[in-house]
Image: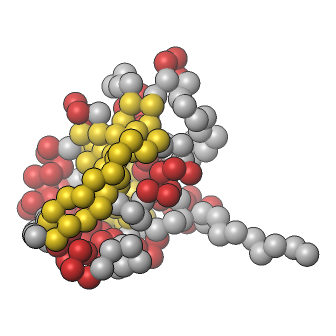
Amino acid sequence: MIEPQRHRPSDALLERVRLRLARDQDAVDQAEVFHHAIMRGAAGHYDLDQREAWACALPRDPGAWVMRQLRYRTLVADLDRRCVGFCELDLPHGRISMLYVWPSLQGRGIGACLLAAALDQARAEKLAHLDIDASLVLAPRLERLGWRRLSSERVERGGVVLERLRYRYTLGHAGFDQTPSTDRSHRMVASR
């Protein structure tokens, strides 16, 4: 008996995705990706009250997202000139502040490419490790990519409690990480 083929990231889709640094004009898309990734993408892991409290933690106002771009090094997954995912890096503190992908594109390799690019950025800064506070949605994907779970915690957003998990990826010396990367398709496009 032949088992059905498991879903794999679409090579055609990933070929069209370009990773680059965020631009001011990405702020509108970032706000929408954040909101919809939570409200739709996290529906199987968090109830409506939790998702609304989480999504309200940041405004949908593009100006707020432009300000975040100034605070964090923000990598964008660009598909057909639209931001469909992003990753905010807080490199001075050795952490990823945010990682979100448009809900219909989740699980197709875009987040993994953003994470790989974030690890490349951390390596360039000679960091020993990179941490992320992950949702229940992201946690299993991080584990498959070699991230190690450190702890779990409950955080309050607008009077509602949410569970999140802290993960760490240890960057080795001389280019050797805790798990080798075989796919280098995540390389950043140099343009901004």
Q: Residue furthest bottom?
A: 48
Asked whether, in this view, residue 58 is left or right of residue 29, the answer is left
Q: As rendered, which of 93 and 152 lies closer to the eye?
A: 152
Residue 32 placement (x, y as % from top left)? 25, 72
Can see residue 186? yes
Q: Residue furthest right?
A: 1
Can see residue 124? no
- Which quarter of the rendered picture does the N terminus lie within? bottom right
Q: How many marks?
A: 0
Q: As rendered, which of 48 and 22 lies closer to the eye?
A: 48
The residue at the point 31 percent across, 57 percent down is: 164
Asked whether, in this view, residue 34 is left or right of residue 70, the answer is right
Q: Quadrant of residue 183?
A: top right
The residue at the point 61 percent across, 66 percent down is: 10
Residue 134 placement (x, y as % from top left)? 35, 54
Residue 165 placement (x, y as % from top left)? 35, 52
The residue at the point 15 percent across, 59 percent down is: 65
Residue 131 placement (x, y as % from top left)? 34, 40
In the rendered view, tell whether residue 109 sits above or below residue 105: above
The residue at the point 13 percent across, 55 percent down is: 66
Q: How is the image coloured?
A: secondary structure
